[in-house]
Image (cartoon, grey):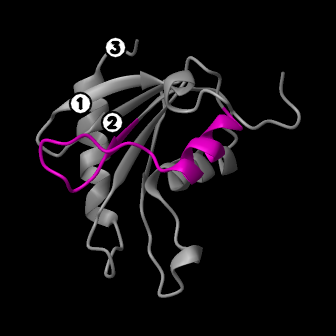
Amino acid sequence: MIKNVKDLIAIANEARNNSYAPYSKYKVGAALLCKDGTVITGCNIENASFTVGICAERTAFAKALSEGKTEFDAIAIVGNTSNRPTPPCGACRQFMSEFVGKDFEIIEASPDGDFVIRKMSELFPDIFMLFHT
């Protein structure tokens, strides 16, 4: 369990401000907690060709990995929906599973502060892996 869930949620909520979501209007922010205590943010970035957009979670992971970060404790995700925590989409679950273990914590939150914490193994019990055991 991470020490300050509410701070991580607040950082993810702030990251929503950088979202580019002119099509869906659904702004999402993420805050990825690295094992060294660093927090890397991400936001969703849409595109007119919908399939080439990127979710907040994958943005945060891509930024972290490109900075040499390879060990992670948790991620907080905040979407637009009040009083309803935002879970990661299926593509993000698969993407994250490449870099984290089954005990990785996913904090699904709403802008109002409601949240639920789930382990990767709960959200993605049958992880597709080619190289990991």
Query: Badge 2: few (under 14), some or many (20 or more) residues near its Cα, within 10 Å?
Result: many
Inter-mark Cα distance, 2 to 1? 5 Å
Residue at disc 1, secondary structure:
strand
Residue at disc 3, secondary structure:
loop
Query: Closer to the observer: label 2 or label 3?
Result: 2
State whether residue 35 is above or below residue 59: above
Residue under pointer 3:
3
Q: Pointer 2 and pointer 1: residues touching (CB < 8 Å)? A: yes
Residue under pointer 1:
115
Q: Position of residue 128 (x, y in %)?
A: 75, 38
Q: Amino acid at mark 1?
A: Phe
Inter-mark Cα distance, 3 to 1? 15 Å
Q: Amino acid at mark 3?
A: Lys
Q: Amino acid at mark 2?
A: Glu
Tag shown at residue 108: 2
Looking at marks 2 and 3 on the same chain, the residue that comes earlier in the sequence is marked by 3
Residue at disc 2, secondary structure:
strand
Instruction: Locate residue 5 relative to residue 127 in the image: left or right.
Output: left
The residue stretch that appears in magenta: 76-99
Instruction: Locate residue 128 relative to residue 46 in the image: left or right.
Output: right
Query: Badge 1: few (under 14), some or many (20 or more) residues near its Cα, within 10 Å?
Result: many
Which picture quadrant has residue 24?
bottom left
Query: Badge 3: few (under 14), some or many (20 or more) residues near its Cα, within 10 Å?
Result: few
Inter-mark Cα distance, 2 to 3? 16 Å
Q: Is residue 36 visible?
A: no
Q: Position of residue 21 (x, y in %)?
A: 33, 74
Residue that appears at 33% across and 81% down = 23
State whether residue 117 is above or below residue 127: above
Q: Is residue 50 visible?
A: yes
